[in-house]
Image: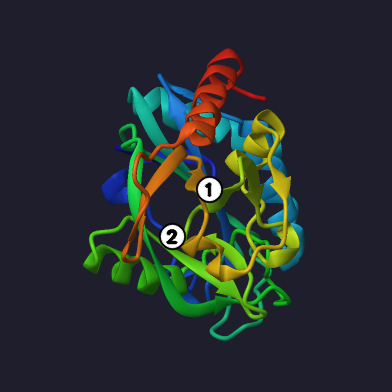
């Protein structure tokens, strides 16, 4: 595997950043996960725009989009995979111990790993921890993912692939790495960004292409929704067949099937929508 680190490709065993990088010591970094298809990234422009929004939210310098695109192209050329997980990581760089940043400039790392199409349906659980819709980094895709690691580990223990969070006021928010959609009386809904969820790229495209409504939803909507599905860069649109102990028979349901079909068709027709 060849990985891009701060201006050039390195073999995986030589791709190094300092142990004093602020992304490692205090989680001062952001990232994007981009699906690639036969060596080409999907929705890269949208991902780079969100990378910049996240950088500004943390007070990091704006990433150079041309430089990041060049790094992505170099990594994909050096690591041919049919379907890939392209990871762009951008951190506060070499810094003193503590929360203050140094002046060495940001660190940029780009890597890709092979992945495969997800199953059409999956199981999820709910967790008792909450998302803070009013936090300093709410809505930013930061590298501070320990909370997600803990929640996802609990999901794996219960034969599920995702854990869903409420926010501090008891509204449905998001998963550890996905957005959630529900069908009520034939209408498609998803929590608004004001709920504290990440403004997912696949979420935005699904709202646009499938005509979903952004709606404040109580967390217990999961107990009565007719259909539920998840969206993310690597899941695309994935139906939920079980939430905790509740089974959703017939998943994927008709609204979800339509959303899956529309997303697949539109995405195939335009790799950078």
Q: Which mark is residue 112?
A: none
Q: Can residue 63 be seen?
A: no
Q: Of 60 and 143, which appears nearest the observer? A: 143
Q: Is residue 129 left or right of residue 200?
A: left
Q: Is residue 138 left or right of residue 159?
A: right
Spot occupied by residue 150 in the image (x, y as percentages of width and height): 36, 74
Residue 97 drawn above or below residue 202: below
Q: Is residue 184 left or right of residue 146?
A: right
Mark 2 element type: loop
Q: Which mark is residue 17?
A: 2
- Rendered residue at 43%/40% (across/down): 238
Residue reaching furthest to the top? 269
Residue reaching furthest to the bottom? 98
Spot occupied by residue 12 in the image (x, y as percentages of width and height): 30, 45
| CB atoms of marks 2 and 1 within 8 Å | yes
Q: Of 53 and 203, which appears nearest the observer? A: 203
Residue 11 drawn above or below residue 260: below
Residue 47 drawn above or below residue 169: above
Distance from Cα at disc 2 to Cα at disc 1: 9 Å
Q: Is residue 31 left or right of residue 161?
A: right
Q: Which badge, 2 or 1, is on the more N-terminal residue?
A: 1
**Residue 82, quarter of the rendered image:** top left
Quadrant occupied by the N terminus: top left
Q: Can residue 47 be seen?
A: yes
Spot occupied by residue 41 in the image (x, y as percentages of width and height): 52, 28
- Rendered residue at 58%/13% (across/down): 269
Residue indicated by mark 1: 6
Quadrant occupied by the C terminus: top right
């Amino acid at each position: 595997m060849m990985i891009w680190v701060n201006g050039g490709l390195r073999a995986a065993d030589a791709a190094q950043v300092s142990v004093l990088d602020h992304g490692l010591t205090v989680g001062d970094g952001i990232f994007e996960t981009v699906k690639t298809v036969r060596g080409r990234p999907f929705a890269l422009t949208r991902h780079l725009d969100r990378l910049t929004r996240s950088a500004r939210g943390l007070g990091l310098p704006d990433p150079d989009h041309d430089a990041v695109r060049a790094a992505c192209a170099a990594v994909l050329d050096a690591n041919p995979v049919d379907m890939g997980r392209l990871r762009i990581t951008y951190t506060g760089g070499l810094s003193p111990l503590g929360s203050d940043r140094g002046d060495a400039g940001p660190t940029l790392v780009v890597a890709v790993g092979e992945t495969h199409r997800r199953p059409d349906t999956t199981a999820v659980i709910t967790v008792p921890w909450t998302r803070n819709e009013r936090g300093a980094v709410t809505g930013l895709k930061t590298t501070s993912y320990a909370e997600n690691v803990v929640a996802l580990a609990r999901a794996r223990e219960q034969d599920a692939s995702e854990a869903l969070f409420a926010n501090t006021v008891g509204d449905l928010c998001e998963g550890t790495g996905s957005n959630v959609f529900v069908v009520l009386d034939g209408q498609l809904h998803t929590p608004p960004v004001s709920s504290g969820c990440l403004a997912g790229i696949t979420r935005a495209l699904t709202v646009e292409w499938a005509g979903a409504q952004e709606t404040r939803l109580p967390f217990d909507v999961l107990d009565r929704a007719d259909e539920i599905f998840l969206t993310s860069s690597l899941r695309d649109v994935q139906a939920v067949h079980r939430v905790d102990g509740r089974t959703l028979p017939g998943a994927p349901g008709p609204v979800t099937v339509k959303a899956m079909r529309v997303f697949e068709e539109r995405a195939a027709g335009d790799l950078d929508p």
